Amino acid sequence: MSPIDRVPLLDLTRIDAAHAADIEAAALRVLRSGRFILGPEVDECERAMAAYTEARHALGVTSGSDALILALMALDIGPGDEVICPSFTFFATGGAIWRVGARPVFADIDPATFNLDVADVERRIGPRTKAILPVHLFGQCADMDPLLELARASGIPVVEDAAQAIGARYRGRSAGTMGVIGCFSFFPTKNLGACGDAGLVTTDDDALAKRLLALRVHGGERRYYHDEVGGNFRIDALQAAILAVKLPLLDAATEARQRNAAMYHELFRGSGVAATADESDRAPLAIPVAREERHIWNQYTLRVRNGRRDDLRAHLADRGVASEVYYPVPLHLQRCFSSLGGRVGDLPETELAVAEVLSLPIFPELTDDEIRFVAEHVLAFFG
Ligand SMILES: *Cc1c(COP(=O)(O)O)cnc(C)c1O
C-alpha cells in the first residue's frame, strides 16, 4: 500500500462497484420510466423510510431545510410566534423559523454534547412560544426526556431537527419519532446522502400527516383546488429511487463510523493529551462524548482549548489532513438575525464552542491507516 499523504474530510466517490452499479441501475430505471414526480419510486422509498425511522408516516421532501419549513407550516406557526432552538447548529434550523415569519429564540447548549441545555430552554419559554426545535447535533440525540417533559408541561409541541441523526437512538426511541414531527436531510454529506438535495418529514399523527401531504403540493388535497397556500416540497423520484438503494446500506456505514470514532478515542485517550469533554475542562484537547444510546457520528468533533484551534487546523492542513469548523458563527450573532438583538455574551457555552470545535474525517470508508495518520498529526501538534 502506498504511504498516506492526504486525508479528505469526506470522499463520496469511495463506493464499492456493486453498490455503485445498483445506484446507477435505479437512476436509469427512473430516467427511462418517464415518471419523475411522486409515483411508485417515491411511495416505495417512503415506506422504507417509515420502517427505518420507526415512524407511522414518512414523506419525502425537497431538502432538510424544506422539511423544517413544512413542519412549522403544518403546526400553523407564523408571524407573532416564537420557536426555541439552539444557536449552535446549521443555519437552516433558525432560517426555517424565520422563513415562516416566526421569531427564533436561541437557547444555549450543554458543553459536553453540544445539544440543547434544557434548563436554558425553560428560561426562554414565554406566552408566544409555539414550538421547541431541538437539533440532534453531529449524530447524537439531544437530551429528549427532560425536554419532552418540559414541553408537555407547557403545552408546546416539539419538532426534531434530525438532519444529522438518521438512525440515532435515545432510550429505546429513534431520532425523529420523539417530537410531533421529525425532519431529516439527505444532503450528500449526511449519513444517508442522496445524489443531490432531498429530505424527509416523519410523524405518528394521522391528521398532521394529511396536512403535510397537502402542504407539500401547494395546499390542495385535490389537484387545482386549494384550501390553503402550501408549496412545492416534493422529493424527486430520482432521488427517492437512489435513497431506496442506499438505505439498506446505512447501518453498515453507521457501524463503520462508530468503529472509526472508537479508534480515534483509543488513540487520543492513550496519548495523555485528551480527555472527554465531560471529564475535564482543562485538557488541551477534548474528545467527543457518546452519551446517548446510539450515536451515529455524522461528525467527530474535538474541542481545542487555549485558543489553539485555528493553529491546529492550519497544522493539519499543512500535513494533508482536512478538517472543518462546524460552526464558526452562532445563529444569534448572524448578521441576518441582527434585528433580534443578539449580543456577544448572550450564550456563553455556544460562543465557547464556536471558538473551540474542530471536526475530523469520520466517513465510513476511511482506512485504519488514515485514522492513525490523522490522530498522529493531531497529537504531534500538542508535542
Ligand atoms: C443539513 C442540515 C439541515 C438542512 O438540510 P438540507 O437538506 O441541506 O436543506 C438542517 N438542519 C441541520 C442541523 C443540518 O445539519
Image (cartoon, rainbow, N blue to C red):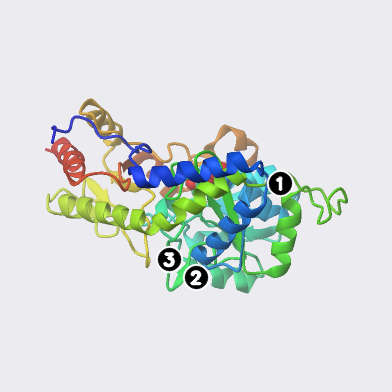
Q: Does residue 345 appear in the picture of this structure?
A: no
Depth check, front residue: 279 or 223: 223
**How far apart, in angstroms, are the residues tagged by discs 3 and 1?**
29 Å
* Left or right of 319 on screen, residue 21: right
- The amino acid type of the residue labelled 1 equals Val
Earlier in the chain: of badge 2 and badge 1, it is 1
Which image quarter: residue 204? bottom right
Which residue is under mark 3? 169
Depth check, front residue: 10 or 338: 10
Which residue is under mark 1? 100
Which is closer to the viewer, label 2 or label 3? Answer: 3
Q: Residue at x 64, y 54 (%)?
A: 40
* Left or right of 236 on screen, residue 174: left
Position of the N terminus by quadrant? top left
Which is closer to the viewer, label 2 or label 1? Answer: 1
Q: Position of residue 43 (x, y in %)?
A: 63, 57
Which residue is under mark 2? 146
- Up-down relation of residue 221 to residue 231 (above or below): below
Binning the other alpha carbons within 10 Å of mark 1 as few (below 14), some (14 to 19) or many (20 upward) gives: some
